[in-house]
Amino acid sequence: MNNPLDPEEFRRQGHMIVDFLADYYHNISNYRVLSQVEPGYLKKKLPSQAPFDPEPIETILQDIEEHIIPGITHWQSPNFFAFFPSSGSIAGFMGEMLSTGFNVIGFNWLSSPAATELESTVMDWLGQELNLPKEFLFTGHGGGVMLGTTCEGVLATLVAARDRMLRQIGKDKIRKLVVYGSDQTHCAIQKAANIAGFDPNNFRAVKTSRSSSFALLPQSLLKAVEKDLRDGLVPCYLCVTVGTTSTMAIDPVGVLCRVAKDYGMWIHVDAAYAGSACICTEFRYMINGVEYADSFSFNAHKWFLTNLDCCCLWVKDPNSLIKSLSTNPSYLHNNTSNSKQVVDYKDWQITLSRRFRALKVWLVLRSYGLSNLRNFLRSHVEMAKIFEELVKLDKRFEIVVPRNLAMVCFRVIPSVAKMANDEVNQINRKLLDSINDSGRVYMSHAVVEEIFVIRCAVGATLTDEKHVMMAWKVVQEHADAILNWYLLNYSFNQPFIS
Amino acid sequence: MNNPLDPEEFRRQGHMIVDFLADYYHNISNYRVLSQVEPGYLKKKLPSQAPFDPEPIETILQDIEEHIIPGITHWQSPNFFAFFPSSGSIAGFMGEMLSTGFNVIGFNWLSSPAATELESTVMDWLGQELNLPKEFLFTGHGGGVMLGTTCEGVLATLVAARDRMLRQIGKDKIRKLVVYGSDQTHCAIQKAANIAGFDPNNFRAVKTSRSSSFALLPQSLLKAVEKDLRDGLVPCYLCVTVGTTSTMAIDPVGVLCRVAKDYGMWIHVDAAYAGSACICTEFRYMINGVEYADSFSFNAHKWFLTNLDCCCLWVKDPNSLIKSLSTNPSYLHNNTSNSKQVVDYKDWQITLSRRFRALKVWLVLRSYGLSNLRNFLRSHVEMAKIFEELVKLDKRFEIVVPRNLAMVCFRVIPSVAKMANDEVNQINRKLLDSINDSGRVYMSHAVVEEIFVIRCAVGATLTDEKHVMMAWKVVQEHADAILNWYLLNYSFNQPFIS
C-alpha cells in the first residue's frame, strides 16, 4: 500500500472531507435534530468483524451518509436548543485540524515547546479579557491550563485541595474531608470527589430554592459547615457555580468565598457555560469575588466557538497542583525541565499525553477578534430575550425562573382546572417529547423543586432569530395539540396520568 | 461578520488548511526533528493581548509557519524515534475531522446514538482481532470504551477496584489498600493511585533486574504481597505491563495473574504500545493469560495509525465501572437510558463530555484493512531488527536488553579502558544530546539499573528503511566524534566527567 501519510493522498482525501462537511453544514437544517433511531440500529447495518481488505474512502463516506448521520443528534443544527451548546466554528475546526495534523504529544515543554508556550500565552490573554485578578495569570505567578473537560479541572483541583488539607491534618484523615456544593451543582463535582477518594457521604449538596432562583446562599452553606465541624469533619473544598445546568442559577461568588475562606477551604468557581460571557463588561459582575477563589474554570467548547474539547482552568497556586500531580520518571528527564524555566503541563493535569488545544483557541481569538466574539455572545442573549418575551406573551406558559444569559426555563400550565403538580409535570414531559420527536427542534429539561422545566438554550453557532421564532412556533403548535387533547379527555375523576 | 460556521467560508478555509498540512508532510524531513527554540521564544513573538479586530486566516497561517512550526517537535517526521510514536495517518486524520465537524457530545446514548453504537461495535471488532476472551466483549457481557489516554483508563479501573474492595472490607479502610506494579511500570499508574486516594506509601514498585529483562517476576510480586499482608495491608490492584516504556519489558501476564487472583486483586494489563501488535498472530503470545485479568488497554494513538487521542479499554465487568462512575442527574434522564437497553459511556469513564473517537478508529480499520495494518506493524518490527543488526555489527556498541517489537535499546561502550559506569553514562548522554541537537533524528533515553540507555523506537508513519539506515549513520558519526574527543582528552588521572 501507499504510505498511510502519503501527502498527495492526504490532500485528495482532505479536500473530499472538507467538501463533505461543508455540504453537511449547508444541509443541516434538513435533518431531524434529535436522532430517531432505535437502540441497536447500527449493529444491524455493520459487519460483525473488522474488514480484512482495505476499502476506499468513497465507500466509507457513503456509509457515513447512510448509517452514521441518521444516528447523530445534530448538535451543530441551528435548531439545537438542548443542554448547553457545543459551540463549533470555522476557526475552532481549523485549529483542531492543525493540531490533529501536527499530532504532537505535548506532555512537557521539550516535547513541543510551541504547544506549551502558546497555551500559556493564550491562557493569559483569556484571563485578562475575563478580568481575572492578576494572581491567576502567569504574569502574576498563577497560571492557566487547557484540559479536556470541567470534570478533569475539578478533579485536579480537588486532589490539590485534598492533599493541601491532608498535609495539615494528617494523611489518614482523608475520609474526614468534606466537599460543598449546592443541590444544583453539576453532578461532575460529586463524581470527581468520589474518584478522589473522598467519602461519598461527605459531599454536601446544600439545598437551594426557587425563591432565591436556586442560588447557593451563604447562610445555608455556613449552617452545613458548622454541622460538619460539630460532627468532627473537616471542610475542604467548595464549588461555587456561575450558571448551573438546570436553570442557569448564579451562586454569589464573593459572599460564599468569604464563608469558605474562614475555614481554609479551597474554592473553585465553575463557570463552565457562563464564563465565556464574562468577556463582556455587562456580564462580568457574575464572577465578582473570584479574587477570593483558588481556581476558576470555563469550557471554551460550550459557548466560545471552540470545538470539543477545551476546558480552561486557572489557579492561583500552580505548585499546589504540581505537588499532587507531578511525575518525574527518568525517561522524561531533560535539562530544560530541570532548569525550572518552563511549564511542564503534565504536572498540572490528570493525564500525561495532551492535545495541542491552544491552537484552536488562538485561531478563534484571532479569526473573530474580541469585538466579534462579544457581539456574537450578545446576539445569543438577545435571541433568548426574544424567546422569553414570546413565552411571556402566551398566558398558558410560565417562565419558571428569571432568565440569565441565553437560557430560558419555561413550562406550560393548563389554566382550566386546579391540577396536581405531577400532572402539570406530565403534560410538560409530553410536550417536550412531542416537540423533540418532531425533529424540528431539540430542547431538554430539568427538574427543580419537583417542577419539570423545559430548557431552551440558545447558542448553536448557526442559530439566528428566525430559528428562535420557529422554535417558539413549534412549541406553541405542540402545546395546542396536547392541551386540546387534554381538554377533550380530562375529567376530574380520572387523573390525566396514564 | 459572516456566521462563524458559514459553509462556503468553511469550505474555503478547509481547503487551505488541507493544502497547508499536505505541504507540511511533504516537507517534513527538512525540519529539525527536535525543536531547538529557547524557553520563552514565543512570548517575544506574540502580542501581549488578544486581538480586538479579526484577522484573516492567511495572516494566521503565515504566523504558524514562522512562529509555531519552529517550536514544534516533529512527531510525524520519519526521523522521529523518541518515546513511543504518535501514530498519525490519513484515515486517522479524516476520522478526527469528521468527529470535529459533527462536534457531538456523546455522554449518553441519546445524545448521539451513532457515537455510542459505533464505539461499541468497533471495540468488539478490535477485541476479536486481539483475540481477547469473549468475556471482554459486549457479546460476552463485558465491553470496551474509548478514552483519551491510558491514564484515564487506569484511573477508572483503579477506582472500580478500590470501591469493589472497600465494599468488602469497609469504606474507611481506603488507606490500607495496596497497588502493585514494577519499578518499570509507567509513572501514570502511581499517579492515578494517588489521585484515587490510595496512600502514596502503598504503591509497590516491585524491583526488576536486567538479568530477567526488567520483567516483573511472580516470586517478587508474591514476596511484596506477603509482606503487606503481614503488615495488615490489603492487596487491591495489580498493573501488569506488556511493553514497558523504558525497555519494552514484557511482564508474564499469566503467572502474575495467578498470584494476584489468589488475593482477590483487580488485574489490569497495560499494553499501551505493544497491544497494537497483538493483532498479528506471532506477537499475540505477549498477552497470553489476559483471560485471567479484569481489564486490558492499549493506545490506538501510539501504534495503530490513529491520531491522538484514543485509549481502548476493555473490562470484563462493566458494572464495576458503572457502580463507581455513574451519575444520574435529572437533566439527563431519558427513556432509553431508563430502559437499560443501551450503553451510556459517561458511566464508564472519568469525564462526562466525550469525543466521537470511534469514527477515526473505524476509518483506520476500513481504510487499511487488517491485512495492511498487520503488514505495517510488521514492517516497523523488521526495520527495528535492521537497526539492531547494525548496532551489533559495530563493536563499540552494546544492545542493553534483547529487542522486543520495534524498539532497540543500546549504548556505546568505549573499549579502550576500564571505565566507571557513571562515565559510560555520561558519554552516552553526550552522544544522545549531540544526535538530537543535530536535528537530523530524535531519539530518547531511559535509565535502568543505573545504565543510561538510548532508545530507538521505530514507528512514525512516514519512516521507511532509508530513514532507519540514516539514523544509524547519524549515531555512528556522532559516536565517532565523541569517542575521538574522548581518546584525545581522557587521562587515567582525570575523570572524563566535566
Image (spheres, coloured by chain):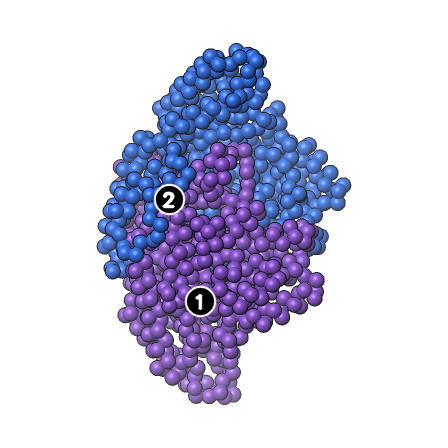
Chain colours: A purple, B blue
Using the rendered image, report if marks 1 and 2 lie on a common chain.
no
Q: Is residue B417 above or below residue A107?
A: above
Residue linked to disc 2: B43
Q: Nearer the viewer, residue B1 or A188?
A: B1
Q: Is residue A116 above or below residue A377?
A: above
Q: Secondary structure at mark 2?
A: loop
Question: Residue at 54% across / 43% down in the picture?
Answer: A326
Q: Nearer the viewer, residue B275 or A159?
A: A159
Residue A34 image label:
none
Question: Residue at 55% across / 36% down in the picture?
Answer: A329
Query: Residue B252: percent from the left, percent from the top?
Result: 60, 33
The CA span between labels 1 and 2 is 31 Å
Q: Quadrant of residue B305?
A: top left
- The reply to whether residue B223 is in sight is yes
Q: Is residue A394 above or below residue A142?
A: below
Q: Chain of mark 1?
A: A
Residue linked to disc 1: A286
Question: Residue at 61% across / 69% down in the picture?
Answer: A222
Amino acid type, mark 2: Lys
Q: Tell me if A173 is positioned left or right of B215 in this view.
A: right
Question: Residue at 42% across / 28% down in the picture?
Answer: B436
Camera-nearest label, 1 or 2: 2
